[in-house]
């Protein structure tokens, strides 16, 4: 049973209002004079912070309700009603959306605060924060939407904002192309989402097209239609969360400012696809083959991205591929019906990935925008706060116990093993070792050893407090967030899993403790092997390698971009060129040309009557009036 509340709409409203006000202020400043950055910053941060406060209110209100009744609804207005289709612009807060709200608003607020220092003195300071507020507000609509149509509004909003922010430094053509790439690839996913919604409405939407109604009527879905819906929705998820084959836009998204990378990778866009699959767990749970497709796509994505991450030299691209890899873990989790495990990894990942990106931003800021890890080194003592917080984030990403990433990742691997997906578990453990390797390759090359660029090192210094305080707060989350869902083997009771239970159709296999011990032991061994190899190769200093053989292949992402360009882009452009040169002039333009020809001929025919003599025009008028009089008299008779 759901309860109606009226304040849910305020949660996305505050950042959206902030975006509008900041945008107007920026336009005003362009024509009337500069506005102080402090005023921009205050307005930019107040919206996300108020949204976080409301998210806490939602959480505690739900917590005080019986588990089976934890559903808060606010139907703002009926958007449109046509026949059986009734779309309400409404919001739904349940255990799943409340958890998402908490970390999206909390981490989003910290990223906004950090950005005050990182973007200081930027000439478009107000425009940047306007886009950031709009990004956060769109994500909150996506999370809070009471049905797939409202979710799609937020879905398109984050897609637009990703384009605006990735191509923020638009004076560089490469940045604009990166924004275009993200926008176009996401349109492929959006088509899948739209088709999935259409099939879903056709099958069971007549009884109501909100999540609660769809869940109630999900038993009416036939297996065939259910499979089609699940696969189409997963195509939509692939656009936002970037598993193979649509991952190619996410590394290029590093063209935007570093706080944008943190917001995209930790708190907003890329988690949307995993959230969508979990939100539709009531359908996926009844279509096991769709779950298998999701799980295998996810784990192969995790492996491929981890391999790419081993050879990157751009600090932000290393973290970008780590995001793609961790998203693969999340999809593997929801694919084996461990929806709470997948969402819990979304939750913990938000803390340590935001921490790592913001820490990388502090390094880039200190080194005057240098991003090549082979031009860094020895920064441990120069930037102690950044080093120790990033080390905590790296340990969480690498899966070191007792950091947050260990518990959430291990829950996914345990679920895969316990449900008989042995192949997924084996690949997952392998990826855990590779992750530890490339994560600490980055840490050792950036912070340890001797400086490789003496001039940049001499000028490096710790970031200002407005940037380091968010790092410290996030480090606390990266260290302790995993304890919120401790399995019984560690004396816990899976608090997050129990909290999410009313929202998800979860599968909890009952297996012996030996299976859980095996999953934990292999994860720890994989971490130990990965970090040991990284230390032996890079811990005591290393010379820059030449990229040959497999390393060159991995550094260039297996030439997948080039493959897409050859197999898809060039043929598409060639077909477009043929259509433009032959089909369009002779077919598409034919009606236009025909109408133009007819008007020209008609004009030439009437031209004979234009002789230039007044007496002739008077005769025309008399003839015209005579005809009109005749017609009028006939009509009256």
Image (spheres, helix red, strand yellow):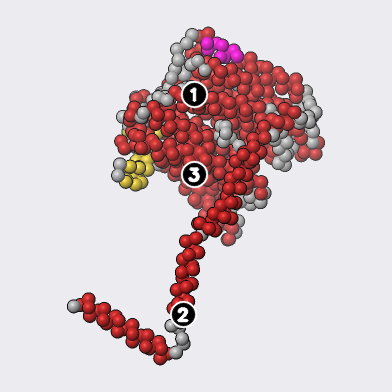
Instruction: From this view, report whether residue 219 is shown above or below residue 131.
Output: above
The answer to which of 142 and 59 lies nearer the viewer is 142
Disc on the earlier residue, 3 or 1: 3
Residue 569 visible at all: yes
Q: Is residue 517 magenta?
A: yes
Q: Earlier in the sequence, mark 2 or mark 1?
A: 1
Answer above or below: position of 585 versus 369. Answer: below
Mark 3 → mark 1, Cα distance in angstroms:
30 Å
- Secondary element under disc 3, as helix, strand or loop, is helix
Nearest-to-viewer mark from 2 and 1: 2
For the point 45% across and 77% down, the residue is 605
Q: Splitting the image into 4 quarters, where does residue 266 fall?
A: top right
**Residue 213 appears in which quarter of the rendering?**
top left
Q: Nearer the viewer, residue 485 or 84?
A: 84
On screen, 363 above or below 599?
Answer: above
Instruction: Identify residue for label 3.
Output: 157
**Residue 434 x %, y %:** 65, 23
Kindly give the residue lying farthest to the left in the view shown.
Answer: 637
How far is disc 3 from disc 2 in space, using C-alphas?
55 Å
Q: Secondary structure at mark 1?
A: helix
Report the magenta residues as a range. 515-522
- Disc 1 crowd, CA 10 A, few/some/many (<14, 14-19, 20+): some
- Which quarter of the rendering shows the C terminus? bottom left
- Residue at 56% of width from left, 52% of height from top? 579
Label 2 crowd (10 A; few <14 / some 14-19 / many >=20):
few
Q: Which mark is residue 19?
A: none
Q: Position of residue 478 (x, y in %)?
A: 58, 26
Disc 1 designates what residue?
A: 292
> What residue is disc 2 on?
607
Q: Secondary structure at mark 2?
A: helix
């Amino acid at each position: 049973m759901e309860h109606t509340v009226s304040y849910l709409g305020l949660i996305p409203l505050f950042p959206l209002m902030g975006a509008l006000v900041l945008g107007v202020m920026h336009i005003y400043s362009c024509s009337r004079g500069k506005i102080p950055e402090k005023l921009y910053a205050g307005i930019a941060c107040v919206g996300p912070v108020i949204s976080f406060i409301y998210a806490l209110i939602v959480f505690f209100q739900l917590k005080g309700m019986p588990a089976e009744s934890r559903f808060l609804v606010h139907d703002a207005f009926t958007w449109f009603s046509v026949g059986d289709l009734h779309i309400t612009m409404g919001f739904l807060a349940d255990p799943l959306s409340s958890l998402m709200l908490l970390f999206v608003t909390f981490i989003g607020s910290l990223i906004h605060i950090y950005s005050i220092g990182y973007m200081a003195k930027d000439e478009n300071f107000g425009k940047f924060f306007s886009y950031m507020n709009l990004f956060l507000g769109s994500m909150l609509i996506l999370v809070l939407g009471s049905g797939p149509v409202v979710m799609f509004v937020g879905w398109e909003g984050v897609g637009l904002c990703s384009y605006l922010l990735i191509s923020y430094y638009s004076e560089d053509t490469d940045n604009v192309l990166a924004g275009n790439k993200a926008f176009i690839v996401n349109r492929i996913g959006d088509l899948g989402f739209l088709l999935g919604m259409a099939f879903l409405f056709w099958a069971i939407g007549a009884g109501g097209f909100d999540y609660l109604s769809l869940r109630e009527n999900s038993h009416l879905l036939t297996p065939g239609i259910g499979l089609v819906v699940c696969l189409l929705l997963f195509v939509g998820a692939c656009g936002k969360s970037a598993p193979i084959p649509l991952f190619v836009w996410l590394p290029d998204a590093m063209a935007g400012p570093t706080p944008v990378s943190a917001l995209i990778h930790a708190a907003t866009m890329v988690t949307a696809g995993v959230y969508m699959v979990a939100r539709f767990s009531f359908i996926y749970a009844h279509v096991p083959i769709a779950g298998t497709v999701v799980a295998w796509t996810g784990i192969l994505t995790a492996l491929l991205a981890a391999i790419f991450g081993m050879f990157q030299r751009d600090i932000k691209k290393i973290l970008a591929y780590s995001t793609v890899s961790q998203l693969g873990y999340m999809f593997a989790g929801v694919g084996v019906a461990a929806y709470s495990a997948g969402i819990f990894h979304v939750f913990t990942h938000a803390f340590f990935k935001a921490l790592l990106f913001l820490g990388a931003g502090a390094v880039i800021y200190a080194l005057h925008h240098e991003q090549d890890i082979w031009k860094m080194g020895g920064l441990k003592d120069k930037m102690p706060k950044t080093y120790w917080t990033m080390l905590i984030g790296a340990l969480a990403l690498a899966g070191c116990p007792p950091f947050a990433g260990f518990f959430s990742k291990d829950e996914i691997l345990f679920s895969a093993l316990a449900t008989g997906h042995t192949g997924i578990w084996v690949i997952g453990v392998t990826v855990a070792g590779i992750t530890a390797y490339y994560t600490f390759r980055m840490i050792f090359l950036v912070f340890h050893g001797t400086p490789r660029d003496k001039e940049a090192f001499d000028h490096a210094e710790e970031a200002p407090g407005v940037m380091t305080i968010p790092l410290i707060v996030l480090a606390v989350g990266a260290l302790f967030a995993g304890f919120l869902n401790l399995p019984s083997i560690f004396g816990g009771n899976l608090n997050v899993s129990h909290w999410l239970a009313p929202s998800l159709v979860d599968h909890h296999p009952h297996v012996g403790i030996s299976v859980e011990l095996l999953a934990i032991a292999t994860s720890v061994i994989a971490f130990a092997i990965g970090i040991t190899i990284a230390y032996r190769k890079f811990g005591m200093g290393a010379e820059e390698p030449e990229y040959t053989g497999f390393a060159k292949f991995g550094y260039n992402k297996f030439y997948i971009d080039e493959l897409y360009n050859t197999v898809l882009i060039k043929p598409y452009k060639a077909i477009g060129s043929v259509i433009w040169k032959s089909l369009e002039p002779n077919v598409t333009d034919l009606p236009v040309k025909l109408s133009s020809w007819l008007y020209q001929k008609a004009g030439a025919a009437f031209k004979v009557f234009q002789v230039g003599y007044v007496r002739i025009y008077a005769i025309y008028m008399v003839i015209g009036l005579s005809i009109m009089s005749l017609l009028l008299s006939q009509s009256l008779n």
